[in-house]
Image: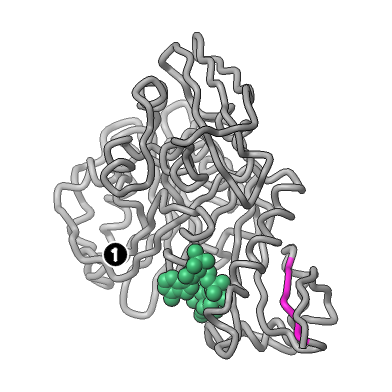
Amino acid sequence: MEIRIQQLGDEHSLAYVRSQIDTFGAHADPAAFRISATGATAFGVLEGPELVAKAAYVQAVTNWNGQRLATATVRDVTVDAEWRGRKIGRRLLTTLLRDAHERGCVLATLYPSVPAVYRALDFEIVADRSLWRLPTAGLAVRRPPEGVTVRRATFEQAAEFHDRYVRAVDGALVRTAAMWDPALTHTVAVDVSGTRIGHASWRRAEDHLLVADLTAVRPEAYFALLGTLATWADLLPETRLWASAGDPLWLVLPGNPSEVVGHHRYMARILDVPRALAVRSWPVDGTAEIGVRDPLVEANTGRWRIQASGGAVEIRRVSSDPGVEALTARALTALFAGRPGADLAASGLGTVPDDVLRLFASGPTPRVFDGF
Ligand SMILES: CC(C)(COP(=O)(O)OP(=O)(O)OC[C@H]1O[C@@H](n2cnc3c(N)ncnc32)[C@H](O)[C@@H]1OP(=O)(O)O)[C@@H](O)C(=O)NCCC(=O)NCCS
């Protein structure tokens, strides 16, 4: 029988949640699940009336260079076991990503269980998020200096600080109200002027202290928040803390927690080349041309001229022919997210001309704070 790919509506909710449970395990309330209530755009592969594969994306917003990029956060990718390895996943995700591009998404992102599947669609790992295990007593690094206080905060106060903090972090999602875990307690560090300069969200888990966020813009805020969390040491000797390997927190903690009890890699794919390049920071002046070949989003294919001057940039397509040395969307995404040209060359991902590399050689390492 022929298969077809289509957008899914609520009439497919039960089949969708069944497939979700088959692949990923239990679901809180399958009978009440409605695709429309998730806010996601879902696509499915059907053989007759049977759903044999499905995937979805939610339109979110990513911070990049202080600007905001429309982002398709891809999730719930499943292909029934009997259909795996027959290009169903590729066809489904191609439809989904083209739809996201048409609806204005500049990036697509996801947490992979199998990176190779998504690399085949030009995604690349750009950030990570780990759950670190460390002794709670080891958090007490220094006495908090004068002029900083810690306070219990409302969700709104925490959200105000978090939103301000992540604006400066490439790759971080804008956290909507629905993305906050309501079970968390919030503590903020406040300076003498009453400005929030740090935030921790945490909760007591069964046998450990779980820290979901620990961010600050001043060292004294880190010290104050860490000192507060350390007061749990007698009751909960173990802390588990979510953070990227590149988090500035690791510059503050004296110890070197090496035990990771959970680890997620974050992959991205540029869906719209000119809009993605236009938001990146370009601290070096210059002009260079880069060829891109993208069979998934044809509009990306071509030679792009990057003209950077005084921090501003102009991106223009100068030819529809990308040339023989064209980069894939995967290689461009890696470069966009700060991978050195030498890594691309060494892995066979692509050869980047020196003048392009000079322009790209800047920008902080992306970090992520949210799972989905
Ligand atoms: C992962 C999954 C969605 C892939 O769907 P699929 O239909 O089997 O994949 P396809 O046949 O379309 O393959 C797509 C590409 O990924 C590659 N690929 C697929 N499975 C792979 C694997 N396990 N390891 C390495 N590469 C793989 C294929 O070679 C292909 O690349 P190519 O087209 O360049 O040759 C499917 O196998 C599945 O549902 N697995 C269990 C659930 C899961 O892991 N979901 C992902 C959550 S992030």
Q: Which residues are magenta?
A: 42-47
> Which residue is located at x 59 percent, y 67 percent?
90
Q: Is residue 279 left or right of residue 140?
A: right
Q: Looking at this view, is 131 or 106 the one in front?
A: 106
Q: Is residue 92 left or right of residue 342?
A: right
In percent of width and height, residue 25 lies at 53, 87
For mark 1, what is the residue? 232
Q: Looking at this view, is 189 or 314 the one in front?
A: 314
Q: Residues within 10 Å of mark 1 (few under 14, many from 20)?
A: some
Q: Looking at this view, is 58 or 198 the one in front?
A: 58
> Which residue is located at x 58 percent, y 90 percent?
82
Q: Is mark 1 within 8 Å of ligand 1?
A: no
In percent of width and height, residue 304 lies at 57, 26
Q: Is residue 105 left or right of residue 334?
A: right
Give SS at disc 1.
loop
Image quarter for residue 354? top left
